[in-house]
Every structure is written in C-alpha cells, then in structure tokens.
Amino acid sequence: MIHNLVVVLFGVTLLYISTTSRLGGYVKVLSVQGFLLFLFALSHAGTLKLGHTLILGFETLVVKAVVTPLFIHYIIEKLEIKRVTEPYVDNFVSLIATTTVISLSFILSVALRNAGAGVDVLTFSISISAVVVGLLIVITNAKLITHVMGFLVLENGVFMMSLSLASEVPVVVEAGVLLDVFMGVFLMGIFLNRMKSTFESSDVTLLRRLKD
Amino acid sequence: MISGEFLLILTPALFAVLSLGLKAIRALTAKVPFFDKTIITVAAAAHLIMTLLLPCGQPAADVLIGLDSLNYLFLLILSVLFLASALYSTVFIKEMAVLIREAHDEKYNHWYVPTMLFTLSTLSGVIMSRNLGLMWVFIEATTLSTAPLILHHKGKESLEAVWKYLFICSVGIALAFIGVLAMTEAAKTNPGLNVDSLTAGAANISPLWGGIAFVFALVGFGTKMGLAPMHTWLPDAHSQAPSPASAIFSGALTISAFLCILRYYQIFCHTPMISFIRQLMLILGMVSLFISAIYVTRAQNFKRKLAYSTIEHMGILSIGMGLGGAAVYAAMLHTLCSSLAKHSLFLTSGNFLHAYGTVNVKEIRGGLDRIPQSSWLLVTGTLALLGFPPGALFITEFSMLRQMAAAGRWVTLLMFALFLTVIIYGLVSAVMRMAFSTPMRGGAAHDKHHEPILCVAPQWVFVVAAALLGIHIPERLNTILHQAAAVLGGN
C-alpha cells in the first residue's frame, strides 16, 4: 500500500517538475524525490540485509534528499544564476509531453506484462517515465545547472527501477549508486570552474565553439 | 593469492600513485619530468610483458576477471598501443618541461602521467571483466579517469569538450545500467551476471528482457564506443586531448566499449534472438558510416577528421558483427589493424601540431619538406587505415563485402561502398594537401623541423604491422583471432 502510494507521488513530482519554471522548484522536487525514494527503499527493507538497507537509506535520505539539493541551492546562490529555468518550450507543451511519456510507459509496461514478463506495472512505468522525463529536461533546457538536475531525475528513475528489478541482487543496486559520482563531478565542475563566467553565462547556447 | 589478471589492473594504478607521491616531495620538484618519463615507460613495458606471459585458455567458472581469446586480443591491443603512447609521451613530457624552463605561461601538467596510468588500469579492468556488473563499474571508471586528459589544455574549448564528454557518456552509462538491470531480470534463475554462465544458460534467458537488455547495452556502451547518433562528444574530446592520449582514446577506449557490447552479443549468439541483434548492429553501423562520410569531408581540423574516421571504423566493426559468419573473424582482424593504424595517425598528427602549431588542414603545407618522416607516415598510415591493399584492412573490408554479396544484401553493399568512397576522398585529399603541396611563401619556415626518433618509430612499427598482417598472419595470432570469432558464434 505504502509502496504504491510512494510510486504514485513520485509520478506526481514528474508532472510538477514539467510545469515549474523556477530553479528553486526543481531543487525542491529533487529533495522530495529523494525522500520518496527513501520510503521506497524502506518498503524493500524486508528482502534486504541490514547492511544493504543502511547503505541505500544513507544514499537516499542523506545524499539524494538533503546534501545534493542543498549543494545545488548553494551553487545557484553563490554563482548568482538567474532563477528561471529558460526552457526552449512552453510549460504547457512540456506538461503534455510528460503526460504522453507517462501514458506510453504504462502502455509499454502492460504490453510487457501481457507478453509474459513478470513486471510490477506501476513501478516500472513510473521509473521508465522518470528516465525519459529526465532526458526531456536535459534536451529542452538551456542552462547547465538544469541539465545536471535533469540527469538527477533520470538517475532517480534508474534507482527506482534497480530496486524493483534487482532487489534480490543488492550489489547491483549499490553499483548503480556509483552514478552519483558523476553528479558530484558535474556539480563540482560547475562550481569550481564558475561555469557561468567561463561560458560567459552557464548557458549551453554558448557551447558552440566546437563544431564542424 | 593474487592472480596475474588482477596484477594487470593493480600495477598501473600503483605506478600512478607512485607518480603522485613523488610530486608531493618538494625536494624532487626539478626531477619530476624525469620520474614521469621513467614511470610511464616502465609501467607500459611491465603491462605488455605481463600480458604476453598470461595464458588465454578458458577461465574458471564464476571468476570476476579472467582471460579468454576474445578479451586477450583486446588486452594485447591495449597493451601494445599504450607502450607506443608511453614512448611518445617521453618526448611530450620533455617538451612540457622545456616550455616551463623558457618561462612560457604553460604549466607542467602534473596529472598527465597519473591519469594516463589510471586509464590503463581501468581499461584493463573493462577488458578482463567476466561479470557484466563489474564491467559496467569499470566503464564508469574509465570515463572519470580519462576526463582530466581532455582538460589538458585548460582552455574554454577543453572545458566545453570535457563537459560534453562527461555528460553524454554519463547518460549513456546510466542507460547501460538499465541494460544490466534488465539482464538480472532476464536471467532470474542465474543471477550472478557472469558472462560464461549466462552464455551456457542462454536458452533459459527470457527473450523479452534479454532483448531489452541488449538494446540498452547497445545504446549505452555505443555512446562510449562512438556509434552514431550517440557520437557527438567524440570529435571534441579526441581533438582536445594531447596526441598520445587521443591515440589511446581512439585506439583502445572505443574498442573496450565495443567489447562490452560483444559480451552481450556473445550471450545471445546461439539463441534465435541473434538475428534481431544483428539487424540492430547493422543499422547503427550504417548510420555511423553515413555520419562519418558527411563530416569527414567537412571538418577542417585534421584530428577531428581522424575522429570521424574513428566513428567510421566503429561503424564497420558494428556492421561486421551484424553480418555474422565469416565477417565476425573479419571484425576481429579489423579491430586489431584499425586500432594500429588510427593510433599511429593520431600520434603523427601530434608531430604536425608540434611543427606547425596547428592541425588545421588549410594551414599545413609542404609537410614533405618540413617533416619528411611524419609526412610519409601520414600518407602510408592513411592508406593503411582506408584499406588499400596490401593492408589487412583491405582483406577485412573485402570479406565483409563478400559476405554481403553472398547473403544478397545488395542495398547494404551499395551503401557500404558508397560511404567508404566518400570517406576515402575526404581523408586522402586532406592528406595529399598536407604532405605534397608546395610550402607557403613566407609562411611557417621551410626548413626542416627536428623529429625525435621516439615520435616516429612506434608509428612505423604499427603501419608496417598493419600492412604485413594483410599478407601473412602469424600462427599464434591467427589462432587467437579464430578462437575470438568462435566465442562470438562466427568462424
């Protein structure tokens, strides 16, 4: 019950993130997603050993829900990045896109189940949606910091999928946590290189020096 | 007891730590370039010797790292290429040190040797992994260890290139992880993710999840390998890294990602799913050839041209695997010889950069007068890379064409030949211009530029080897190639 509620709420955060146009909204959504993933991991605690539960609990509650959003918030303040997301498409369009993605994911998951793959339709479709929505955020936004947040949404989707598919092989789930290393490198990269000043503003439209 | 395979991963990492440790000692600061040169050469030589000493039989069941003929071939390529890069690097390091002494604004890059060695260590790990999960972890590690090499020049372009590289590859790696997850779901009865046991029990793998696993693995690792349309980071990263490093990127990093895809291919090679897998690889390979044909003629920076040619060769490898049968053996030989040729061309482009201060095709004239050895290397290396006889790449590409004709794939054959022709034109015209044109008047000096022996010798060895392998393949190597093809269900 709790398990399904968490997954549904996670889906709601995906819809919310596609309508907000404030960087602060993105950061809050990431924090909420981290907390939801913590609850999600707890609902799997029955099948996991204590050590694995502690690692995953730390990863979700400390890293995903608190430290990462705080650091992103700090970077936005420190580098004085403008607070709007500057997407290439309208909020309305991206909401429609997200809804379409979620619907298609459900269709795909049901098709998978009908084809004989034992799959938890709700969890699988929401996690696939998170992966695609993360990619959409990366594609439709100009700012580097938004790209990193899109990558984090994608990563959250991968994490949810890893718990639902591979919770009997916890080592694999923990290997997936290594993706956070990239996130750390990106954030440090933006912060240390003051990406805003280096590319004049931290705007990908200026990432055009290298081309043919 | 520590196995020889494990030592291959550990040793370069230890040398890297040693290099970092020596730099921390203040009194030794003046000696740093000397230590760096020694460390990278010794580490590379040790790696090659250990590789040659290791046996390549069938590894024991359920080991994490182990060598069979397939990854032994890739390990051999990595080891030989790295030794060449290491020898070339000694000159490169000396020049960095000279620049500091002459008080130019460039700084000695203390991270160059340690990151090269970490890259060697992580690449060995990728190649020797027999566990899909561990292989994925090592691929992530290679991405991180190679990033500082792209940032070498510390300019805006480098930062942009390294950002693109890390970002695009990390998305690819996240997708590849979904492939690993799908594989655990596909083989519920066999959760160890060991390649050998998965291959043995391939009949019990759910085709639905197996298919999903392969698609995600192909897209994810294909990003790292440089298959179009996920290739966009590759020309930037390859042109920004210093030549010995970009040679490793092009020669060894890309084929390590190729090996990851081959491991998934291997699992399914005796199941009915293989025809679906081959179709996918054929399509991606053809798209890569197409993209390469478009851009190789347009790019003006010679290193970017070479990068697009790397994409071409990745496409050819993918097509070879897509054809199956005898083309699998051709793909194995192609992996070996195209790596040798690409590596030698990237190193040679470094000589041009040193002599002319640019690799822009339009600004380089009369190479034959200024750097004769490098110019001849450029010409012969390009001919070898493009598959002119008697080079081995002629044989491999010809046998792929024959396979296409035998299977009645006339459209594929036509496209393959057409794209290759365009690419040959794009590269040959640039090379002729760089080597044989008359020098610009009053432009960069006509006089000869010094070419250190270590900056040309490794390339000569590789170019000659790539040519000779077309005429005769030594018995032991041929056995390895055939066994590697047999692992992948080819002959």
Image (cartoon, rainbow, N blue to C red):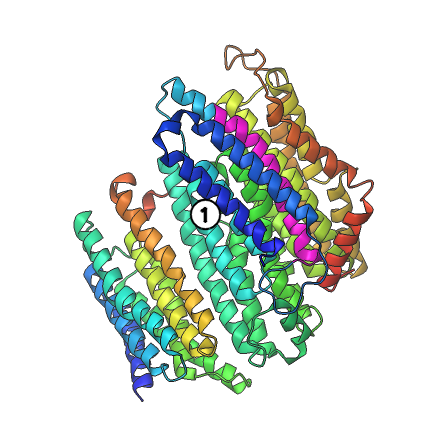
Label 1 resides on the chain identified as B
Q: Is residue B119 above or below residue B95?
A: below
Position of residue A28 measured from the top left corner of the image (x, y, whole percent): 21, 66
In the image, residue B54 lies in the stretch drawn in magenta: no
Q: Is residue B255 above or below residue B46?
A: below
Residue drawn at (61%, 57%) of the image: B3
Magenta residues (range): B67-94
Residue picked out by circle 1: B145
Residue drawn at (42%, 76%) of the image: A105
Q: Is residue B406 above or below residue B178?
A: above
Tell me which amino acid carries mark 1: Ser
Question: Quarter of the image containing the N terminus of chain A?
Answer: bottom left
Q: Residues within 10 Å of mark 1 (few under 14, many from 20)?
A: many
Position of residue B229 measured from the top left corner of the image (x, y, whole percent): 52, 54
Q: Is residue B438 above or below residue B231?
A: above
Q: Quadrant of residue A23?
A: bottom left
Q: Is residue B419 left or right of residue B469?
A: left
Q: Quadrant of residue B453?
A: top right
Q: Is residue A171 left or right of residue A64?
A: right
